[in-house]
Image: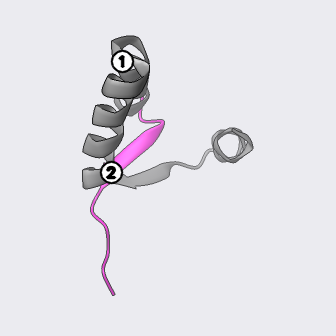
Amino acid sequence: MELFTGLRLANRQLLLPSPIVAEVGHLLATKAGARTEAFFLRALADRDFIPGRANHG
């Protein structure tokens, strides 16, 4: 939690590789429920996390 708070306070964004976004959404939906998944999706919409491509080497 401190990492996310620190990033927000520093006006920085967290880049999430696109496959991770899909996996996190699925995990949240199946393990924590639709409401928690909706909070994650709202954070994506609010650009708290930025979906992007992973760089390989």
Magenta segment range? Answer: 46-57
Q: Does the magenta stretch include residue 28?
A: no
User: Number of marks in the image?
Assistant: 2
The reply to whether the C-beta atoms of the residues labelled 1 and 2 are less than 8 Å apart is no
Q: Which of marks 1 and 2 is nearer the N terminus?
A: 2
User: Mark 1 is on which residue type?
Assistant: Ala
Judge whether 38 appears above or below 13 on screen: above
Residue 52's spot in the image, x, y percent?
A: 30, 55
At label 1, counting other C-alpha atoms closer than 10 Å, the crowd grade (few under 14, some 14-19, many 20 or more) is some
Judge whether 14 appears above or below 35 on screen: below
Residue 46's spot in the image, x, y percent?
A: 41, 27
**What residue is shown at x 39% (from left), y 12% (from top)?**
35
Quadrant placement of the N terminus: top right
CA–CA distance between discs 1 and 2?
A: 16 Å
Tag 1 secondary structure: helix
Q: Is residue 48 magenta?
A: yes
User: Quadrant location of residue 28?
Assistant: top left
**What residue is shown at x 52% (from left), y 48% (from top)?**
13
Q: Name the residue under label 1.
A: 38
User: Mark 2 is on which residue type?
Assistant: Ile
Quadrant placement of the C terminus: bottom left
Judge whether 46 appears above or below 57 on screen: above
User: Quadrant location of residue 37?
Assistant: top left
Q: Mark 2 points at which residue?
A: 20
Q: State the mark number for residue 9.
A: none
